[in-house]
Amino acid sequence: GAVVSQHPSRVICKSGTSVKIECRSLDFQATTMFWYRQFPKQSLMLMATSNEGSKATYEQGVEKDKFLINHASLTLSTLTVTSAHPEDSSFYICSASGRDQETQYFGPGTRLLVL
Amino acid sequence: KQEVTQIPAALSVPEGENLVLNCSFTDSAIYNLQWFRQDPGKGLTSLLLIQSSQREQTSGRLNASLDKSSGRSTLYIAASQPGDSATYLCAGGGSQGNLIFGKGTKLSVKP
């Protein structure tokens, strides 16, 4: 099956710094990528949907100026957490789907810890 | 290594039927079990989250159970409707937040 990678798998940063997380589709063209986060003991929640070459669509309650999403190519999307704070500490997962939009392939996730 | 399996891969039922979707996992040291709904072109929608200490969760017409000893979870949908047509995914959660997904069950509810 299709493979989606995320980098880094784990990151620790100081409060106020920005962190970039990459999501890559390794063997298919991802026309749509999704970004999720999961806080401890909570369910996975969708943050935003991005289509290649266009602006991301953010879910209600997700600050688009804080969580910058770039989907400049069919194989790469990045999520930048700007001016990270401890409450942003979470598990971030991306998924990607091809043109058929039928199946989403999930990355392994990135654990972010903001001190 | 945790593996999650969902059976059946596809299911078609007439409107109004009650149905059960099955999910099995290999590692009973599961932190939680989550059920999601996936519509074409859309992000996942979380349906139910069952912590490892719980046996079931209910939301409206949905009921999910968790049996760690047998490595199984079921999602029960009562009085199915055409709007329930979607792909349903279960995922086993580890203590680090990592999720292992099954491949999903594609449900079609015929009017």
Image: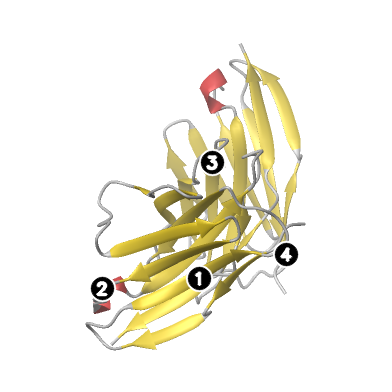
Type of residue at label 2?
Glu
Name the residue beneath numbered marker 4: B3
Residue for point 59% across, 57% down: B91
Give the distance between the C-alpha atoms of the residues marked 2 and 1, in whole angstroms: 21 Å
Name the residue beneath numbered marker 1: A22
Type of residue at label 1?
Glu
Work out which residue is located at the far top of the displayed protein and give it.
B111
Give the distance between the C-alpha atoms of the residues marked 1 and 4, in whole angstroms: 25 Å
Give the distance between the C-alpha atoms of the residues marked 2 and 4, in whole angstroms: 31 Å
Name the residue beneath numbered marker 2: A87
In x, y percent, where is residue B21?
A: 66, 39
Q: Do the residues labelled 2 and 3 touch (CB within 8 Å)?
A: no
The label number, if any, that marks residue B37 in the structure image: 3
Mark 4 burial class by Cα count in 10 Å: few <14, some 14-19, many 20+:
few
- Frontmost residue, A67 versus B77: A67
Type of residue at label 4?
Glu
Kindly tell me whether residue A40 is visible in this rendering: no
